[in-house]
Image (tube, helix red, strand yellow):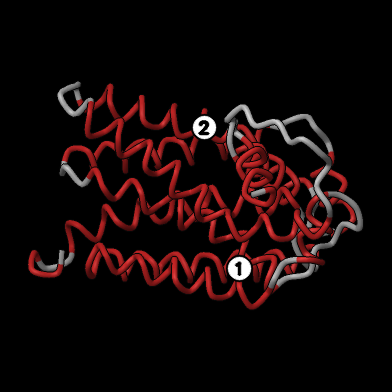
Amino acid sequence: MMPFLIALQFLTTFPIQLKEMPSKQQNGQSLLFYPLIGLMIGAILFAIASLLHALPIILLSSLILVVWIWLTGGLHLDGLADTADAWVGGFGDKERTLAIMKDPSCGPIGVLSLIILCLIKWSAIYVLIEQQHYSALILFPILGRLAPLFLFLTTQYVREKGLGSSIAEFIPKTVAVMVFVLCLLASAYFSWVGIFTAMIFMVTLIYLRRKFMQRIGGITGDTVGASVEICETVSVFSFVLLIFYLPISWI
């Protein structure tokens, strides 16, 4: 249970107390449980939408977004802000980009990126609730937490110390690939809308990886966190668009 508890403690605000310091191997194994944590987050969001569906849509969508952020402690949003600041302030230089990502302060570009992302996500949630696609809220946190699996499997971790380095070194690659593929295939539960959303998710993830490789030659904890947020938002936004543009028989 230790790898699961590590993932739960790291990715959520649940009050988890580890009885001992985890080993590097356990840190690596914890990555396998990231999609399960996404499933738990999604299930909570689905439960809120289902139980409180009588609320005004604007209020319910705001509540869901706030709970979504609260459950993760804003961890990935912090990574997004740091990455956005570094990408603009780094001027294309690897070392400068990495140095800015280490800076705990948040610049104007970071703040702007958070506002834009939350606005898009809130708008998409609003439409989902309006169309009564409550169960789709389970899908997006899962897809978002597949991003770390993909990136750690395919991309070098550029920092030598920290949790990310032990994950990159000890991730069980074969099992991780199986978990990734099975979770991605689960998108088919939502028919063609889910399948196309998964395809857009993959294109987004591959594009992000390419940009990370071009700028810093790999990934950091911040870029992984940014990927989670971007992939979640692109997925929920794509799902909403597909609802309106795919034939009714495909939904």
| Kind of residue at badge 1 | Phe
Residue 175, given in percent of the width and then of the height, sits at 61, 73
Q: Secondary structure at mark 1?
A: helix
Disc 2 on helix, strand or loop?
helix
The residue located at (68%, 74%) in the rendering is 173
Residue 62, quarter of picture = top left
Circle number at residue 71: 2
- Taking the view exactly as shown, the residue that stands out farthest to the left is 249
- Return the residue nearer the eye: 198 or 32: 32
Q: Residues within 10 Å of mark 1 (few under 14, many from 20)?
A: some
Asked if residue 217 is positioned above or below residue 5 in the image, the reply reads: below
The image's mark for residue 150 is 1
Relative to 228, residue 147 above or below: below
Place of residue 130 in the rendered image (x, y in percent of width and height, measured from the top left): 17, 38
The three-letter amino acid code for the residue at tag 2 is: Leu
Residue in the image at 58% along x and 55% along y: 33
* Cα–Cα span, label 1 and label 2: 23 Å
